[in-house]
Amino acid sequence: MVPDRRWHDNGSDDRTWGAFTDAAPWVLDRDAVVWLPLAERLRGAAQAEVPDLTRPSRLPPGTRVVTVAARLGRALVPWMIRKRRGRYATTEASRAEISLRLRKAAELLGPTYIKLGQIISSGEGLFPAELVNEFKLCRDQVAPEPWDDVRLTVETDLGARIEDIFSSFDTTPLAAASIAQVHAATLRTGEQVVVKVQRPSVSSLVRKDLRVMAWLAPHLVGRIPIAALANPPALVELFAETIVEELDFRMEAANMLDMARVLKDLKQDGYVIPRPHPRLVSRRVLVMERVAGFKFDDVAGMQDAGIDTEAVIRTGMIAFMEGAMIEGLFHGDLHGGNMFVLADGRTALLDFGIVGRLSDERRLAFLRLMLGATTNDVRGQVAALRDLGALPMDTDLDAVIRDLRLDQPTIDPTTLSGDELVKEVQRVVKALLGYGARLPKELMLYVKNMVFLDGAIASLAPNLDILGEIANISMLFAERHGERLGRELGVDANAMEINLDSVKAGFGLEPSADALTYRDLQARRDLIQKRMRDHVGR
């Protein structure tokens, strides 16, 4: 499959329908992209496979169980012995040790567990900081595959020798992660590209590991603290739904085109998507244009170049929320390694293996959730969470509101002792579990991205007024999409009044609060976490 010049100038401009870079290495015509017609069928087949992969077997599924148990045992047992003997000076030292051990075990166990670690690495605020920081090393610092294996994969999938397709191909990868690694290359037609190459055995190994997880999950219910916060079998299913779509790069390339169209339709000029090659995409190989820019955490570099980092964050929040609530499509795995900020301040989004796709029903539920938050409609928010799949459809909403005390005045968590904070968390978790609460895939991806954006604000815009931005985004939604919101939700958009009391309650603020910078928010969080740590460590 050798590239040729006819893809470079077909008399059209793909920027009329997609949010692509200005300097096109080739022009994309959706009707002529050879791999695109397969994507929807492949996506359906991948999701149809999930129930079989996550159905727990009565007997251990093969020898892989022994390998997994041995690796995890070597990680956990020495730590448990040392902890029981009081060998750790502080709780933080204990968490640092187990985090390191789990990260090393994940890397030894391979792609599935590395991918799980990558998801944890995006959960700042959801998981202990030590665990998040360790698993950040799994994003792009995993040991690469040998060059001979990479070459074989590329040539087998593209049906030609590397020399017949590329004038140069760097044998050392730019980055290596769980599912694939990426190499810089230049096509024989002159374009600089990035080539994403899947690890040779990853597809079969992921499926084996999912069956092991499915067999193990029921045995974890009630056994370990983290399992008490969720349903382990449901978490395995959630993980499977996410990872199976990453095993065929034709789906990822189609996601890139879909996201480019959505951003263009939303007039989100602050984002660009690299173009996948119209021909050089297969199940295990994805060739795309190469883009360069500042790493998302290079705040000093961006500011020295005159880039408004607050504008970068503001654009990101709006684009993410609009994509989910207006178009039902959003990037599902935002993190610093998947985003470059270009010299002109636009952000290039990378890595579309995980994308959130919302049915119309769930998209409208997201809209109602936002509407309820900005109009202080507590019952509307709980109903929206039910419709998103977070609660069973027959849930008594009034009982949930009563049991979670959502109808009572806000209690500022910074006024509580460590013991009171722990008891409050336990009370809420117990109540949610009692109602059968779960975290559906789309909601998990959305929350994970919000957590990432929250952390990005800390470095790029620490003085941003969170309450002010939420109010501004709400008004922008009403201005841009008011007519559509009114039609789809059956409300008069012009008559809606912004009331952020429930948003303030979510932050533990009194209704009288009129501003909250990220610095203030982080100080409150640090105080709460310290009190809880001190209580648990006693």
Image (spheres, rainbow, N blue to C red):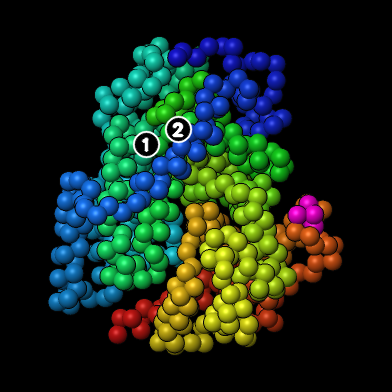
Q: Position of residue 209 (x, y in %)?
A: 29, 47
Local crowd at mark 2 within 10 Å, few (<14), some, or many (≥20)? many
Tag shown at residue 180: 1
- The region drawn magenta spans 484-488
Q: Quadrant of residue 537?
A: bottom left
Residue at image point 57% right, 46% down: 357
Q: Nearer the viewer, residue 389 or 123?
A: 389
Q: Position of residue 114 (x, y in %)?
A: 32, 48
Dot 1: element: strand
Q: Position of residue 218 (x, y in %)?
A: 30, 62
Please say if 476 is above or below 347.
Answer: below
Quadrant in the picture for the N terminus? top left
Q: Is residue 77 visible?
A: yes
Type of residue at label 1? Ala
Residue at image point 47% right, 64% down: 438
**Disc 2 marks which residue?**
249
